[in-house]
């Protein structure tokens, strides 16, 4: 992003495609050993190779490698594809290849130009079929639709209002088709909504025509079967630098998820305690988290602001820990957290430091009047000064020695670019680009802490200039503790999910509110003063504290189905059992990728609900979240249907149109929150949704045999399933599940009419029998048992009562 409004439509429409093949094969050269003769056109970064004897083409691009292979030319004949025969190949020039066929008499011309491959045919019923390499680093996608409805990708207004800087704003567009749906992927997936691929390594979009279908190959899931109609003319278009030139990101570096394969799960002290947090609060919440959520994958306990303020509220980070609030000190606290099997995190603003203002005035940024530039009531450092960089190395070495493994960097950006009153003549380095200086500072810090420490950046409305160094970004407004106070979280997901797990994880807020609804008077005796003050300052009329059961389901559904960071922030011991269960059923976070590669817009503001209510707020939040899954648990969709309004609603949903499901297939639905099989679905379903609720259905293709459709452990249905196999010769379904020791675990199966269970066997790995129960009710079968330390193996044998 930069600090001006950008319209990327012109750039997007001018970015065209390219192709490449092995440069060692010369034009017209025959392969050795009596192989097929090859004809090659090589131009503009593309190579197209025609194998005349096999009647196939290969398209390769110098940056991307193979784009399409085994390209075959066909004619559409009703519902059939008829391959053309009698190939001859002519190379018109270095950038053009023409295929002539005898049956039928027709011609197909392939023209290469920068970023664009034009395909022309004399047969208007022509169809190209091919295979496209599509591993996890080349994903199906919906890309920006410049013909859609315009929206703005905006950071917060903090830099503008607090620092006098400019607002970070980039134009985006909602798609024309299915703008109310957001698509995500867990595993190697496909669907009829996707006509493009995105290469995560090179920041390149590969766009096919809207009539093109991309379906996973059953024999090799890292390939997509491509069906590309050519009604006279068609194209393949490349869009290089997609995230930067089209979407407006200031830079691009693919997220290195080697150490952090999924977004983190973090408890932050901020929304539960604000600056009133104490050592006792951290210890009590750590104990609760270790007991109740660590077995479900929970990771980090992050101490936020309130541990080191000086007389005027300034920060010195390591010198002035408040001994009255943290009597045992930071090292004792991190060791305590680690002893509970969790990791310690810390809020910090590395741009500022009060401890050297008197001794080293040359370290600091000043105004033209000679006053310190202040952020968080603390003097800001001049990162162009080598002595400041040495100090930062020592600071993070100390914090690392103390045991911190997660940092939230607040006010994170290039201060010289954000503060117009800065006296640039007082900078240590007056000639270097402030952005280069800023990124060098981040490199110094990253080198000091190493790759195994998680960095979260909060840019405070400044551009995301730390891409490549931060593991996550919190690019949104602070939350507060009721339903309206959670809207910044939804806005953050809505606006930023397109970069989650692409160049950074998305941290959508500083703590979910999952406590029960209560009045302000009730909350006065149970919540910290800062909680109530924040609510009063940000909404009018005040709507109370906490959320309803449906609202809590919507919150955890949006976090877990989008793959963003999981921010927990309540006073955890006050959480009722049913809300704890919501957390347990949606943890851990999963390695989910976005398939909608564009911002849906972010127009919320910090004081938005001082002017309107949630019911009158017009937003672009999705009404359908479609997580497409391909895992050991099967290939299916987990779909969240949300009602944002305060009245119940009933909707009719087309599975084919909205979810991109195959109209020729039948489907089974499992209602996750109600733990109930709904049976075989029609192609269009009716669904009732309570106010502010999210219904979550796992929708599986009907396999016409006993099949697993859900479990009680995780909303995605995939986390706990390590393996499953169907043996048709023995009518036996078996699998292995990872469970939480002592917690009840339930598997749900759909059985065709007439099928009954004859035997169920459950054992821990190593053949130790595990007591279990099973119950069949019509087509629904449940198998339940207590979770074990070891993986649990289950085996179910069936018989067809109609064959008796």
Image (spheres, rainbow, N blue to C red):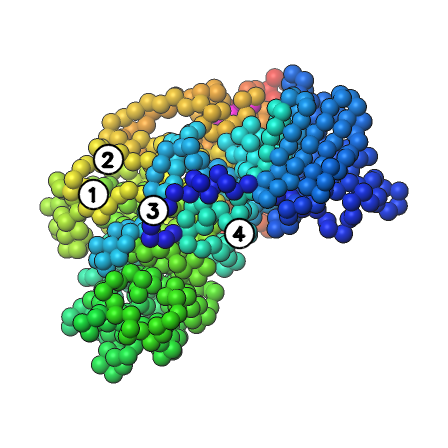
Secondary structure of the residue carrying tag 3 is loop
- Do the residues bearing badges 1 and 2 touch, measured as CB atoms within 8 Å? yes
Q: CA distance from mark 2 to mark 3?
A: 24 Å
Quarter holding residue 544: top left
- Do the residues bearing badges 2 and 4 touch, measured as CB atoms within 8 Å? no
Answer few, some or many: residues within 10 Å of disc 3's Cα (few below 14, many 20 plus, some between 14 and 19). Answer: some
* Residue 667 belongs to magenta span: yes
Query: x and y percent of residue 531 in the render?
Result: 18, 52
In magenta, the rendered stretch is 665-669
Query: x and y percent of residue 105 in the render?
Result: 76, 21
First in sequence, mark 4 or 1: give its number: 1
Secondary structure of the residue carrying tag 2 is loop
Residue sitting nearer the eye, 158 or 116: 116
User: Which residue shows up at 46% across the image and 48% down it?
Assistant: 245
First in sequence, mark 1 or 2: give its number: 1
User: Which residue shows up at 46% across the image and 70% down it?
Assistant: 447
Please give the residue where the numbered disc 3 appears in the rendered image: 5
Secondary structure of the residue carrying tag 4 is loop
Quarter holding residue 691: top left
Identify the disc placed on residue 736: none
Identify the disc placed on residue 608: 1
Please state which of the two labelled residues, at mark 2 or mark 3, is closer to the viewer: 3
Query: x and y percent of residue 672 in the render?
Result: 41, 34
Please state which of the two labelled residues, at mark 4 or mark 1, is closer to the viewer: 1
183 relative to 241, above or below: above
- Do the residues bearing badges 3 and 4 touch, measured as CB atoms within 8 Å? no
Please give the residue where the numbered disc 4 appears in the rendered image: 790
Q: CA distance from mark 1 to mark 3?
A: 22 Å
Residue 573, visible in the rendered structure: no
Residue 450, visible in the rendered structure: yes
Identify the disc placed on residue 617: 2
């Amino acid at each position: 992003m930069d600090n001006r409004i950008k319209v990327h439509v012109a750039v997007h429409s001018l970015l065209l495609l390219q192709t490449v093949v092995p440069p060692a094969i010369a034009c017209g050269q025959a392969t050795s050993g009596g192989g097929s003769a090859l004809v090659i056109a090589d131009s503009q970064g593309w190579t197209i190779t025609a194998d005349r004897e096999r009647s196939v083409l290969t398209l390769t691009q110098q940056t991307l490698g193979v784009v399409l292979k085994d390209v075959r030319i066909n004619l559409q004949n009703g519902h059939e594809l008829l391959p053309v025969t009698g190939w001859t190949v002519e190379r018109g020039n270095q950038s053009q290849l023409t295929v002539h066929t005898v049956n039928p008499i027709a011609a197909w011309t392939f023209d290469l130009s920068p970023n664009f491959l034009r395909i022309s045919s004399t047969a208007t019923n022509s169809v190209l079929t091919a295979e496209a390499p599509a591993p996890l680093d080349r994903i199906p996608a919906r890309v920006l639709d410049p013909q859609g409805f315009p929206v703005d990708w905006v950071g917060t207004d903090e830099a503008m209002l607090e620092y006098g800087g400019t607002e970070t704003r980039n134009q985006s567009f909602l798609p024309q088709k299915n703008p109310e749906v957001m698509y995500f992927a867990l595993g190697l997936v496909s669907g009829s909504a996707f006509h493009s691929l995105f290469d995560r390594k090179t920041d390149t979009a590969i766009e096919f025509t809207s009539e093109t279908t991309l379906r996973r190959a059953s024999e090799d899931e890292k390939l997509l079967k491509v069906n590309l109609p050519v009604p006279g003319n068609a194209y393949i278009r490349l869009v290089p630098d997609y995230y930067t030139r089209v979407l407006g990101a200031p830079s691009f570096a693919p997220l290195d998820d080697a150490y952090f394969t999924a977004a983190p799960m973090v408890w932050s002290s901020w929304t539960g305690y604000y600056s009133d947090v104490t050592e006792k609060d951290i210890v009590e919440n750590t104990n609760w988290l270790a007991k109740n959520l660590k077995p479900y994958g929970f990771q980090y306990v992050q101490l936020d602001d309130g541990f080191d303020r000086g007389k005027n509220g300034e920060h010195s980070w390591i010198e002035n820990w408040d001994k009255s609030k943290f009597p045992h000190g930071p090292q004792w606290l991190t060791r305590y957290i680690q002893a509970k099997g969790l990791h310690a995190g810390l809020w910090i603003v590395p741009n500022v430091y009060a401890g050297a203002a008197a001794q080293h005035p040359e370290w600091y940024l000043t105004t033209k009047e000679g006053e310190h530039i202040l952020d968080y009531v603390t003097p800001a450092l001049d990162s162009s000064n080598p002595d400041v960089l040495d100090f930062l190395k020592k600071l993070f070495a100390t914090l690392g020695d103390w045991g911190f493994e997660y940092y939230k960097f607040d006010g994170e950006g290039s201060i010289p670019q954000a503060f117009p009153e800065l006296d640039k003549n007082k900078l240590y380095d007056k000639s270097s680009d402030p952005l280069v200086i800023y990124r060098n500072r981040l490199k110094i810090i990253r080198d000091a802490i190493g790759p195994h420490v998680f960095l979260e950046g909060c840019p405070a409305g400044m551009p995301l200039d730390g891409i490549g160094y931060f593991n996550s970004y919190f690019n949104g407004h602070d939350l507060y503790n009721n339903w309206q106070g959670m809207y910044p979280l939804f806005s953050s997901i809505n606006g930023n999910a397109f970069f989650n797990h692409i160049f950074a994880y998305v941290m959508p807020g500083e703590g979910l509110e999952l406590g029960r609804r209560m009045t302000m008077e009730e909350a006065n005796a149970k919540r910290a003063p800062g909680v109530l003050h924040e609510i009063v300052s940000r909404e009018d009329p005040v709507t109370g504290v906490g959320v309803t059961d449906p609202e809590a389901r919507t919150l955890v559904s949006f976090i877990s189905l989008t793959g963003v960071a999981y921010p927990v922030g309540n006073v955890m011991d006050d959480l009722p059992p049913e809300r704890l269960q919501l957390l347990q059923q949606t943890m851990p976070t999963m390695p989910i990728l976005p398939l909608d590669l564009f911002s849906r817009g972010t127009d919320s503001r910090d004081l938005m609900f001082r002017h309107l209510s949630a019911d009158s707020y017009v937003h672009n939040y999705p009404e359908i979240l479609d997580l497409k899954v391909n895992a050991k648990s099967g290939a299916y969709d987990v779909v969240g249907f949300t009602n944002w309004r305060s009245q119940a609603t009933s909707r009719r949903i087309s599975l084919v149109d909205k979810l991109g499901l195959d109209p020729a297939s039948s489907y089974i639905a499992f209602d996750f929150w109600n733990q109930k099989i709904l049976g075989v679905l029609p192609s269009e379903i009716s669904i009732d949704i309570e106010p502010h609720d999210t219904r979550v259905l796992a929708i599986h293709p009907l396999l016409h045999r006993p099949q697993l459709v859900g479990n009680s452990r995780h909303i995605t249905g995939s986390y706990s399933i390590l393996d499953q196999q169907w043996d048709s010769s023995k009518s036996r379904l078996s699998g292995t599940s990872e469970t939480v020791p002592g917690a009840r675990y339930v598997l749900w199966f759909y059985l065709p009419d007439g099928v009954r269970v004859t035997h169920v066997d459950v054992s821990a790995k190593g053949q130790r029998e595990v007591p279990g129960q099973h119950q069949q009710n019509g087509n629904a079968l449940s198998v339940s048992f207590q979770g074990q330390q070891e993986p649990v193996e289950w085996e179910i044998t069936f018989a067809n009562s109609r064959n008796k």
